[in-house]
Image: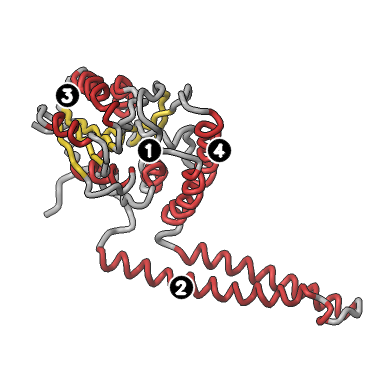
Amino acid sequence: MTVSVSAVIPVFNEEPNLAGLEAELSAALAGLKRPCEVIWVDDGSTDGSFARLRQFALKPGQRALRLAKNYGQTAALAAGIAAAQGEWIVTLDADGQNDPEDIARLLAAAAAGPDVVSGWRRDRRDAFFTRILPSRAANAVISAVTGVRLHDFGCTLKVYRASLLKAADLYGEMHRFLPAILAYAGASVTELEVNHRPRRAGLSKYGLLRTFKVVLDLLTVKFMGDFITKPIYLFGGLSFALLASSGAMAGYTLYNKLYNGVFVKDQPLFLLAIFFALVAVQFAALGLLAEVLIRTYHSSSRRPPYTVAEEAGPVRP
């Protein structure tokens, strides 16, 4: 029987929350009236989480994976996504704050055409200054930089078209940027309000340090999305900007020498012009090296720099 929906849940030291979540999730998926599977991924838990997941795996339609150590949420999601067999993949947290009852609404929204339906925890049940405020700032920055306008990139409860999600490269802590990464590949993304509940037990695995990680990861996502096939545009653009600035400063230095009698040795701006020119040359060289590396990567991996969204007509042999 072909699986329609795969639910992927990364787990890290959430043993007290698992029994309640499993009961709610099983009921929610049964209500969908379509073939479903649940994939639990234990991300190196040190409590009794995997023992509990072993019990779940005895039930039909449920599987449990245990990673060798704590690799992080992105790696755990990647392992679950690779194992998923459904046409649609649903991801949610194991802490019980995501409501499994929202899965049906997200899938209904996806049936209307979008490739990604992202949950929006509008009424979020977390501490304001340590969780909500940094999250709002991060979401605003991510939306502005990537052009994908979402209120809540950090909400794990999302529905993805499996064919697109499986083609995405996940590493580091890129899971929060998945809607933007898939949008760069041509996916359509929408957002839907979801219920958010207080944590029942255990401690949150998130902190303010993640805000700084988001900024660093965002630079990577922006580069990989906009310049991965044409890095010379980025480095060449910076090079031209620095050369123009260098020329302007050098011209101003010459103007002061000829018309105001100010010697070059008395104008520190000339040294800055030289510095900008040297950095411009380095950026140009870096852009050319990046172009060579990108072309070598695509040639060796034989991965095309595009994604086919749909195909019609007879299949060619």
> Which residue is denoted by mark 2 in the rendering?
288
**Frontmost residue, 248 versus 92:** 92
Residue count near mark 4 (Cα–Cα under 10 Å), binned few <14, some 14–19, many ≥20: few
Tag 2 and tag 3, C-beta contact below 8 Å? no
> Measuring 69% from the left and 72% from the top, which residue is drawn there?
246
Q: Is residue 152 above or below residue 78?
A: above
Nearer the observer: mark 1 or 2; the answer is 2
Q: Which mark is residue 137?
A: 4
Nearer the observer: mark 4 or 2; the answer is 4
Q: Position of residue 255 (x, y in %)?
A: 84, 76
Three-letter code for the amino acid on which mark 3 is drawn? Arg
Q: Is residue 20 above or below residue 83?
A: above
Q: Secondary structure at mark 4?
A: helix
In the image, taking residue 79 as reference, residue 283 lies left or right, namely right
- N-term mark: 2 or 3: 3
> Measuring 32% from the left and 70% from the top, which residue is drawn there?
296
Q: Position of residue 95 (x, y in %)?
A: 33, 29
Three-letter code for the amino acid on which mark 4 is drawn? Ala
- N-term mark: 4 or 3: 3
- N-term mark: 1 or 2: 1
Residue 59, by quadrant, is top left
- N-term mark: 1 or 3: 3
In this rendering, does residue 94 appear at all?
yes
- N-term mark: 1 or 4: 4
The quadrant of the picture occupied by the C terminus is bottom left
Tag 4 and tag 2, C-beta contact below 8 Å? no
> Which residue is denoted by mark 1 in the rendering?
188
Three-letter code for the amino acid on which mark 2 is drawn? Leu
